[in-house]
Image (cartoon, rainbow, N blue to C red):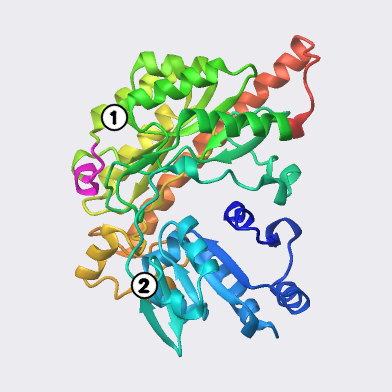
Amino acid sequence: MASIFKRMKCQVTIYNQAMHHYSEEHLTQYLDKYRFDIVGIGTIAGYYPYQKLLAISKAVNASVNRDTFTYLLGGHMVSADPSYFLHKTKADIVIRGEAEKTIQDILGGTHEEIKTIKGIIYREDDKTYKNPDRELIHDLDSIPFPSYQLFPMYYYRLQRFPNIEPTQFSMSIISGRGCSFHCTFCYRMMEGMRLRSISSIMEEITYLYKRWGVTYIDFADDLTMSSKQRAVELCEAFLKLDFKISWRCEGRLNYVEPEILDLMKRAGCVFINYGIESLDNTVLKLMKKALTKDMIIDGIEKTIAAKISPGLNIIWGNIGDNEKTLKESVAFLNHYSDFAQLRTISPVIPYPGCELFEEAKRLGKLKDTADFYENKYTNSDLLAVNFTELSDTAFYSCLYDANKDLLRNYYYKKCGASLDILQNLYGRRDASFRGWRHT
């Protein structure tokens, strides 16, 4: 978004609360001191982002200059129910869905013209008005690269990911938007999938390498491995670079084949994050995962054989889940995890905007978005809605036992790995050892 503003010859300021640990009071004082035409916040769904959005909105609205700027929201969380979030935050406009074209119309429009802009919901005299949705951006290469120079890259590039070396700098990028699957718990608002060109992706990676020394790329897509052909094209482009890059991506077990995995390994892939969710065929079908237990096990075994770490994501508490399905998931994680990451099991969350949210309302377990965020959803590791036949008490007892088992196994393995390092240090006089804080 900063790049879009700059393209339109606007002055852009990034207020970085996270890095500096600024208080909300500091934000109010900042907005009192400096004048802006637009103050914007983008959000993802989550209990912490929701609470943070409310706190930031309170700080924004407390500014003595509040009447002089437009307060604008965007992102997945607010797009699911814009009217609710306009009321809750007292923002002026919500951009629903993609914002790159919509914001250009907002910047170039008069007050009356804004009322006709596609893709927005706006507030006027405490009433909200919804305009028609905007068409998706199909040419993702037309969107400029992020304005990295406006951000504290020396801080951002220190983020750690699975199998990253201590000396590597990292950065997250997007290779496409959307997903071709329709899982019931996914709150993605956009239909279909659109991809950037391989040349555009490599151009951005080359810039990050040459300008910021980035040698580890985190593909933060909904789905990076969108097809077998796409995976091959991406790998071939990595192999043509004249510098070495490690990378992680979002994978799909539908597309896993030994030849593709071997190519990914040679191209620098060190971690593939898989949305597995369950090992029970009935639950998988009810989730619309388009996976089976046999496909999952086969794909994970092939990934491990290719010496790529698999990210094993499991949720529990969906329609059809019970104690047996949970035990099966625990056994799977303990057997197949290579412990590149700590993996525990969390309850399924029916975020507003997803099919499961509508099912929860149909079952009388949720009323609306307000009920979800204000009453039910307090933490991603606690129940928002119980879709099982277990009582809440029994549900938590099962989840406690499951995660206790997973945690014990993880730290047991980590202890063993540390003892191996100790043996190499003193038994083989390993001079490459750099201290326990770096292991």
Q: Position of residue 149 (x, y in %)?
A: 71, 46
Residues at circles 1 and 2 in contact by the CB criterion of under 8 Å: no
Alpha carbon separation for disc pair 1 and 2: 33 Å
- Judged left or right of residue 308, residue 165 is right
289 part of magenta stretch: yes
Corner quadrant of residue 97: bottom left
Residue numbers of the magenta segment? 283-290
Relative height, residue 353 to residue 234 (above, below):
below
Task: Look at the image and say whether residue 35 sits in the magenta stretch.
Answer: no
Label 1 CA crowd tier, 10 Å (few <14, some 14–19, many 20+): some
Residue drawn at x 37%, y 65% as measured from the top left: 80
In depth, the one of 378 and 154 nearer the eye is 154
In this rendering, the answer to whether 131 lies above or below 104 is: below
Residue furthest to the bottom: 125
Residue 262 sits above or below residue 338 on the image: above
SS state under label 2: helix
Q: Which residue is mark 2?
A: 369
Residue at 59%, 25% in the rendered image: 246
What secondary structure do most residues of the magenta stretch adopt? helix
Amino acid at pointer 2: Thr
Residue 184 percent coordinates (x, y): 27, 52
Q: How many marks?
A: 2
Callout 1: SS: helix
Q: Nearer the viewer, residue 58 or 107?
A: 107
Quadrant of res 67 = bottom right
Q: Work out whether residue 339 can be spotted.
A: no
Q: Amino acid at mark 1?
A: Asn
The residue singled out by tag 1 in the image is 254
Report crowding for label 2: few under 14, some 14 to 19, many 20 or more residues within 10 A (C-alpha). Answer: some
Give the percent coordinates (x, y) of residue 46: 47, 61
- Image point (20%, 69%), residue name: 362
